[in-house]
């Protein structure tokens, strides 16, 4: 297949760019995580928009008027995705216990769902997390026919066969990871081992397999749902190749995105740009410039700008620890003084970020180790002021940085701010060293 050869060529190109910088890898994986969570749940009927999904995952902000169940689905799916992204880095075999644990993370808690009996009559049943189905979960198709999956009695042995098949295929020297992941997805769906969450679980397991072989995850987009289901239906008819081809084409898109990200280029999809332009058009036509602060804008600013700036500030200050006996990081906010700060994320978790008006982060050095040069102290500071229509970054230079909330700090700006602060400290130590 042309798409398969294309995928392998792109994989070789991606491998040549490894190792990917930490900053770019975090940017890429966050993009995959957000897209994966939104689209995989939306395929199953979740009502949260992409923006609402992003706000929930990154900042814990719920969408007004949307069902609690939809929020729980996103939260559970995100937890399952993060767990898989973590364990795939080590040796973690794909077993039935692994699959049941994944299902437990995905669905979080048991609940009731509508169902049909083997005779096609409506009923309800309780979905038990992490447990194989106890009742049939056949589905009523649009043609009025019942599509039958494995029975509850058949499921345990068929899952054992599936896992054994996978482990045998995985161990083959000439294993084809794309074919293996695609076929596992289909075989899993054909069993439908759980009462609910089978589609989401199948897609996570497929991506777990791909990532084990250093491929990026595949994201099946909601807008392409018809083609996805059509490819699965062809597989039901005994034609697995179209489904493998479908997954491969989507994998090509993921590989292209990851290569762009590895090179430091934009990883936004064309439809993302269209959405942003449409949003800008609405704002301009309505006279809304988007300058005033909102809770969501402040939360986004923290995630994408202030937290990376603070982390870089602390990390670079630590390079000077060697010159002093005592060092201490502290933070002052509207909500109190945190002194010392050992874990920045822990401190920020205790603060209502959306309500802050000021944050002062200070790194203090005292008792110069070589007393021949005197008992010198030094301090570096960053101050963030959060005004109604703009935020200000002050760090000891005559000119502050002032931006609107819709204008994040660029990576280059963060590097420049930190470099200027560190150069000031280096200059001070140089002067001390040259004074004797």
Image (cartoon, rainbow, N blue to C red):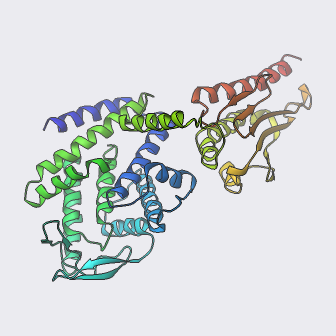
- Asked if 1 appears above or below 239 in the picture, the reply is above
* Residue 85 located left or right of residue 186: right
* Residue 308 located left or right of residue 351: left
Q: Is residue 355 visible?
A: yes
Q: Give the residue displayed 50% in from the left and 62% down from the top.
A: 65
- Residue placed most toward the observer, 86 or 396: 396
Q: Quadrant of the N terminus?
A: top left
Q: Position of residue 220 (x, y in %)?
A: 30, 49
Q: Is residue 220 visible?
A: no
Instruction: Farthest residue to the front: give it.
Output: 286
Q: Position of residue 380 (x, y in %)?
A: 79, 33
- Residue placed most toward the observer, 281 or 274: 281
Q: Give the residue displayed 22% in from the left and 41% down from the top.
A: 249
Q: Quadrant of the C terminus?
A: top right
Q: Quadrant of residue 368?
A: top right
- Residue placed most toward the observer, 408 or 276: 276
Instruction: Farthest residue to the left: give it.
Output: 238
* Residue 328 located left or right of residue 174: right
Q: Give the residue displayed 78% in from the left and 39% down from the top.
A: 363
Q: Position of residue 211 (x, y in %)?
A: 34, 48
Q: Position of residue 125 (x, y in %)?
A: 32, 81
Q: Give the residue displayed 38% in from the left and 65% down from the top.
A: 102
């Amino acid at each position: 297949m042309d798409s398969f050869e294309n995928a392998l060529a792109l994989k070789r190109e991606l491998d040549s760019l490894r190792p990917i910088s930490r900053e770019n890898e975090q940017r890429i994986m966050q993009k995959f995580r957000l897209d994966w969570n939104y689209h995989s749940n939306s395929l199953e009927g979740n009502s949260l928009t992409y923006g609402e999904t992003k706000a929930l995952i990154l900042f814990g902000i719920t969408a007004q008027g949307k069902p609690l169940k939809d929020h729980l689905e996103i939260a559970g799916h995100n937890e399952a995705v993060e767990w898989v992204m973590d364990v795939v880095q080590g040796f973690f075999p794909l077993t039935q216990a692994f699959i049941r644990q994944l299902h437990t993370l995905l669905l979080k808690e048991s609940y009731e769902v509508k169902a049909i009996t083997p005779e096609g009559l409506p009923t309800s049943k309780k979905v038990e997390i992490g447990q194989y189905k106890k009742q049939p979960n056949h589905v009523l198709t649009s043609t009025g026919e019942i599509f039958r999956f494995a029975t509850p009695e058949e499921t345990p042995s068929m899952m054992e066969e599936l896992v054994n098949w996978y482990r045998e295929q995985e161990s083959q020297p000439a294993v084809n990871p794309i074919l293996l992941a695609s076929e596992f997805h289909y075989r899993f769906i054909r069993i439908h081992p759980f009462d609910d969450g089978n589609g989401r679980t199948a897609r996570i397991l497929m991506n777990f397999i791909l990532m084990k072989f250093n491929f990026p995850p595949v994201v099946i987009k909601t807008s392409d749902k018809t083609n996805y289901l059509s490819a699965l239906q062809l597989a039901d008819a005994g034609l697995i190749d179209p489904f493998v081809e479908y997954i491969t084409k989507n994998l090509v898109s993921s590989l292209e995105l990851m290569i762009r990200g590895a090179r430091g280029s934009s990883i936004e999809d064309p439809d993302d740009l269209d959405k942003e332009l449409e949003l800008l058009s609405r704002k301009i036509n309505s006279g809304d410039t988007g300058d005033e602060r909102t809770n969501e804008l402040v939360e986004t600013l923290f995630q994408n700008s202030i937290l990376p700036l603070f982390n870089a500030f602390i990390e670079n200050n630590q390079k000077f620890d060697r010159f002093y006996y005592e060092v201490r990081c502290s933070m002052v906010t509207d909500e109190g003084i945190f002194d010392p700060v050992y874990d920045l994320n822990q401190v920020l978790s205790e603060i209502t970020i959306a309500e802050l008006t000021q944050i002062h982060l200070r790194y203090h050095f005292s008792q110069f180790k070589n007393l021949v040069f005197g008992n010198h102290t030094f301090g570096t500071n960053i101050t963030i002021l959060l005004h109604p229509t703009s935020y200000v970054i002050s760090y000891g230079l005559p000119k502050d940085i002032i931006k609107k909330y819709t204008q994040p700090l660029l990576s280059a700006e963060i590097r420049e701010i930190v470099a200027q602060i560190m150069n000031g400290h280096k200059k001070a130590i140089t002067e001390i060293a040259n004074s004797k």
